[in-house]
Image (tube, grey):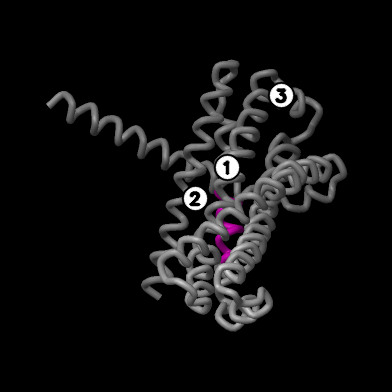
Amino acid sequence: MMSEFWQRLFVRLQMRQVRQTVSGSLALLWYAFNNLHVLRLSPVNVVFQRQLFFTGVEALGIVAIFGLLSGALVITQVTSLIGGDSTLAVKILIWTIVREVGPLFAAIIIVARSSAAIASELALMKTRGEMKSLERMGISPQDYLLVPRIVGVTLAVLALTIYFQLVAIGGGLAISSLFQNVSWLDQVGRFLQTVKLSEFAVVAFKGCLFGLAISSISCYNGMQAQPSVTEVPKVAIKAVLQSLLFVFALDALIAYLNMTW
């Protein structure tokens, strides 16, 4: 009985924490959407560009590596199972890379690189009293710190999702052409004939949705830190775990809606 009580209590606490994160993140997103005009200010724009560079540009290398490996792995496994059916290989590449693996892997890479960094940076600024200093100078911490990070991370996730798709598909088609004795251009032609424009619309939608979730959850956890140095690793871990949780939950929800529609 006692073990069941503690299990139920733990589940309730976790659900309460999730609800708080959802409501707090949605409030941050609403604030950011209503204050996009602050990006025109030079200091805010500098923060936005730095966040875009850190989250997007500096991740190009690792995203390219994961993209090539993902495309090569899918084609290698498909070839070992079905042999030299190049048309089916292209279809499976679309089913796996375009629909699921691409957006999900890009989001996971961003979570691993940026969620902890954003939450830790904001928590340290709060611990050191830098946010109070901004308020004393008449500068809104939300405008200067949160809006450029939310917009920058969202755009970076969208761009990296498309970049991952291009690298993974290009690499997968190249490996397929080697294994199945067809030209790479023929494989590209089969891909373009098979893929639908709506597939890329769903990819862009996923990229934006994942970016909004990652950025808002990371910023929310950073802003919730208590004025103690020991809070920094706690909010960093919480930001990563909650970002991953919501990315997978959103991906499952989108997959379910696509299946029912």
Q: Which of disc 1 and disc 2 is earlier in sequence?
A: 1
Residue located beneath label 2 in the image: 247
Q: Quadrant of the N terminus?
A: top left
The crowd level at tag 3 (other Cα within 10 Å; few <14, some 14-19, many 20+) is some
Residue depicted at x 19% and y 28%: 5
Residue depicted at x 61% and y 77%: 182
Q: Given the image, on which type of amino acid does mark 3 rest?
A: Lys
Q: Which is nearer the eye, 134 or 162?
A: 162
Residue located beneath label 3 in the image: 132
Task: Work out which residue is located at the far left of the displayed protein and give it.
Answer: 1
Viewed as shown, does residue 188 lie left or right of 99?
right
Q: Is residue 57 above or below residue 179?
A: above
Task: Work out which residue is located at the far right of the displayed protein and give it.
Answer: 42
| Disc 2 and disc 1 in contact, CB within 8 angstroms | yes
Residue 128 place in picture, x, y as percent: 69, 18
Front disc: 3 or 2: 2
Task: Work out which residue is located at the far bottom of the displayed protein and give it.
Answer: 193
Secondary structure of residue under mark 3: helix
Task: Tell whether position 207 is magenta.
Answer: yes
**Stretch of the chain drawn in magenta:** 203-213
Residue 67 place in picture, x, y as percent: 61, 55
| Disc 3 and disc 2 in contact, CB within 8 angstroms | no
C-alpha distance separating marks 1 and 3: 28 Å
C-alpha distance separating marks 3 and 2: 32 Å
Residue located beneath label 1 in the image: 111
Q: Given the image, on which type of amino acid does mark 2 rest?
A: Val
Q: Which of disc 2 and disc 3 is earlier in sequence?
A: 3
The crowd level at tag 1 (other Cα within 10 Å; few <14, some 14-19, many 20+) is many
C-alpha distance separating marks 2 and 1: 9 Å
Secondary structure of residue under mark 1: helix
